[in-house]
Amino acid sequence: MDHTRRVSPFPSSAYASGCCLLAICLIAQNSRAEEPRVATEPYLMGEPAEVTQVADAFDKDDPIDVNLSIGYQYSQESASIAREVAGQTSTVNFAHYSESTHRLLTRADIGLYHDIALVIRMPVILANDRSLDGAGSADDQNKGTRGATTDGSTPLFSVPFKSPTRSGVEYLALGLDFGILNQYRDASKPTWVFGFETRFDVSTPMHACNANPAAGQVSCADPGDVNRNGQYDSNTNASGVQLENSAVASRGKGVSRGTTGLEVHTYISKRIKYIEPYGGLKILAEFPTGKSDFGLIDFQSSLVNTPPLEGTLIVGMAVIPWEDRTAYQRATVDFRFASTYRSEGRDYSPLYDALGSSAAPSMRTPLWSEYQAGPNGSSVVNTDSRRVYFNGLSDVQQHLKNRLSAEFTYQAAKFIKLGVGLGYTVIQSHFITYDQACNANFTDNSNKSGPCRKDALTQAGTTTQTDYTVTGVPNPNYRPAINSSGNRYRVEDSGLLDGWLHATVMF
């Protein structure tokens, strides 16, 4: 299979979403709010669809808005885990992945001025469980878990496999929303919101763990603990720090992504009698924090060090079949489609725990981060360079996620609003161990090229180390047992079902 990076064009579904968004904008520019002419026509309340609502302050009839919301969400993700097999054109499905999450959703919207709001969110994971169950024949499972030739009979992991239950604060988000335009202040305009939020990592980042480790092994071993028995390798931890004595290396399982996130979003809607179509865009970028494991693989010669970049196009329609403005009551049904493109990046894959806690020599043995000039023009390992330990984070291929959802919201009174929703996401098949052996961005230093160069052949059929072509420098995060063609892992038939309910008190 071709292992070359490709820049994928935006998928057709995302293109369609963009066209719908453009259509909404055109409608918003050319339509005016309908004033009720007869008793049967709607008498609009002063709030737009949920997606474009912004708490405000210092209005004549409403000096301050404070909305407090609490909710619960349950999600269930499932996927088939497949692996390439050397000499075959198809992959072998050997495991079924399952992940369930119970999440508490807390949110506060505080009006600061006209159509300007401070937004505070803090999702709390009550329980997150991940597991791998065997699929296919016993031979399929052996092919899916086999180690490299250097591992002998040691598999990379075994199925069934179970991760420990994780819980804690997912992140703390602080943001601002701005109502650039408001249909209910100017009926000739749509409602247009722009905002951003920063997500802070306030809990322990995830660490690769095995809920049922083998005898003599710890559940959550430090990457530098090559024997998985609670002792550092040669008095050196995974960060390359020399220790006076071998220290206990077991650590907490963690729950957060170990990143600081920045999200920028914009949404536009236009109420037309009983419906309010809308569209929008949001972009999320994540930056690793110092306490996460991303720093252990951050080398100049690495191909991918950072988490993926995520962009989402949203189109939808809120249907308002009934409302009573005098009683501040309204029923809304919101239908939404979202198409998300997630770029290639270093991430927590479905095999994060299984591979990160592996005891196979090909995964736990450290590699050297650099090469140096050797005898007779060769390039050899620099044993003074930093050691590279595998911690479970892997290079995940770019892919698309398409989501359909519906939510029913009932505003029971001026100060109370209730909602319930259901959604389903289809996740495009993609590789989850996608690293390459060489970084072609560095071709000007033959001393550090190591195996990333092609030696010339003499007429006698022997190689010469004095005549060669440099193809790059070795990628220190490349592991042939999972990254070479014929060994890579892939997620297929992946889907996520989630449901939620929430209640909001509005002051």
Image: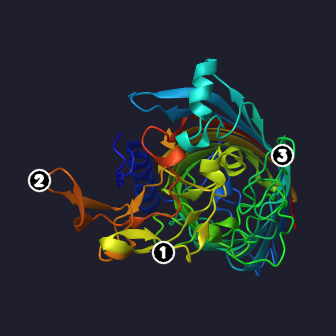
Residue 356 located left or right of residue 100: left
The residue sitting at 38% across, 43% down in the picture is 12
Crowding at mark 3 (Cα within 10 Å: few <14, some 14-19, many 20+): many
Q: Which of marks 3 and 2 is nearer the N terminus?
A: 3
The residue lying furthest to the top in this view is 137
Q: Is mark 2 on a helix, strand or loop?
A: loop
| Badge nearest the viewer, 3 or 1 | 1
Image-quadrant location for residue 448: bottom left
Say which residue label 2 marks: 459
Of marks 2 and 1, the one in the foreground: 2
Q: What residue type is labelled 2?
A: Gln
Badge 1 density bin: few <14, some 14–19, many ≥20, Cα 10 Å:
few
Task: Measuring from the top left, give residue 134's x and y in whole percent.
Answer: 69, 26
Quadrant of image for the N terminus: top left
Tell me what residue is drawn at x 39 percent, y 61 percent.
438
**Which of 319/30 is in front?**
319
